[in-house]
Amino acid sequence: MMHEKILRIGLVAAGLLLAACSDQNGANAPAGGTMPATEVGFVVLKAQSVPRYAQLSGRVVAHATAEIRPQIDGIIESIDFREGRQMKAGDLLFKVRDAKFSAAYAAAAAVLSRAEATEQSAQATFARNERLQSQSAVSQQVLDEAKAALLQAKADVESAKASLEAARIDLDNTTIKAPIDGIIGTASVSVGSLVTQNQTDALATIRQINPVNVDLVDTSANLLRIRQDVEAGRLGREGEGAPSVKLTLENGAEYKQTGTISLATVNVSESTGTFTLRASFPNPEYILLPGMFVRASVDLGTMPNAFLVPQRAVQRSGTGDPIAYVVSADSKVEQRTLSTGGTSGNDWIVTEGVKDGDRLIVDGFQKISAGASVTPVEATIDEDGVVEQSLAAPAVAGDASGDAK
């Protein structure tokens, strides 16, 4: 009897405890017994014309480069420029000792004078024999020999003229001048150095860097995609002319001058699968120097009826396709598969998958899935892609949406 009494008391106490817990849970449960819909932040999408840019890397190269080498053998007599200065075509750079070349020129001139004198004598002899032969005073053989001597004398004159011209060229080459405009580097020789004709080492190098070129590299796959966009009418250019290019320097600063694409290679590298574009830029302040690494933004044209979708709102499906979530008219979540056409700032350029007026979920999508009911709250996003205003539930520690302000 005592054991049965204790058992009955225990059962009554357990029942009271369960009832109390049930009453407490019931007080916290929402009316109707369902959980409240998740709040999500959204922005309204609007179709617009979006500029399309290609982000490429490249290096600065000189517009023209001239390596100065001697055309004769000799001793450097003087260096007539200041290193690192702007040079004009025709400016004197080096002077080679010219004594032996002056002597060679004088000797060639004397040979020419002798040949011309011989020619005059041969001309007179031929004319005299020609008159005598007409009077049958000399034989035809004598006349033929006089004519041959005249032709030989004329050939000797032409040979002497050529030798004199070669001597003049050598003498002129003792003064080495700038072949192009540009900035000259350091001299690799000093006064008294022996130089040789067409030596391997350049005496100095002149680089023309205003304007300056930038060689940009892109993949052949990107080239094909751009061509497809143009042919499909998804990419148009306003006006005519070469595409414009803007540069970002190594320190992150934007280069003030705008360049244009001047040429593109007609072959793709077999080892890297890339091709090269060359852009030309004004460089009046010599900010761009050969060898610098830069980032370029090439204006490809404008994509009509495109959408700018914040990158934070785009995810990847199991197959790797870009997807996003929108709020339907009945406040349900819909999943959309997107077609992208590059980026613009912190946004994806989307050409298919969304439509004008769609409410794109940009905050709180970590807690939802397709088909779920949500409470949409309009939000705004700043230039850095961060939600500035959102009435979504406050993020807890470790919540992926913690960048919402």
Image (cartoon, rainbow, N blue to C red):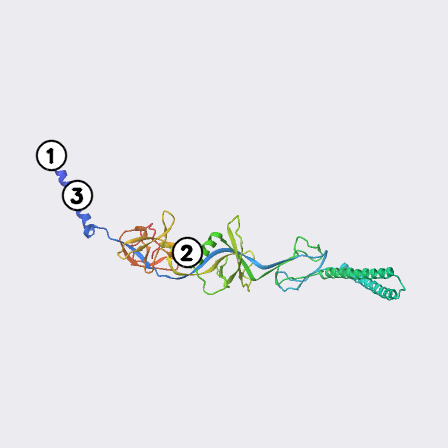
| Residue at point 15%, 42% (across, down) | 15
* Amino acid at the residue labelled 2: Gly
Circle on res. 4? 1
Per the model, the C-alpha gap separating discs 1 and 3 is: 21 Å
Circle on res. 341? 2
| Residue 173 picture quarter | bottom right
Closer to the camera, 317 or 293? 317
* Amino acid at the residue labelled 1: Glu
Report x, y in % for residue 291.
55, 56
Number of marks in the rendered image: 3
Say few, some or many: other residues with alpha carbon within 10 Å of mark 2 (under 14 / 14 to 19 / 20 or more).
many
Circle on res. 400? none
- Left or right: residue 142 compared with residue 255: right
Q: Is residue 107 visible?
A: no
- Left or right: residue 206 compared with residue 293: right
- Left or right: residue 145 compared with residue 308: right
Per the model, the C-alpha gap separating discs 3 and 2 is: 60 Å
* Amino acid at the residue labelled 3: Leu
As helix, strand or loop, the secondary structure at mark 2 comes to strand
Q: Is residue 343 visible?
A: yes
> In this rendering, is residue 321 above or below 151?
above
Closer to the camera, 35 or 147? 147
As helix, strand or loop, the secondary structure at mark 1 comes to helix
User: Going from the N terminus, do you reach mark 1 or mark 3 first?
Assistant: 1
- Say which residue label 3 marks: 18
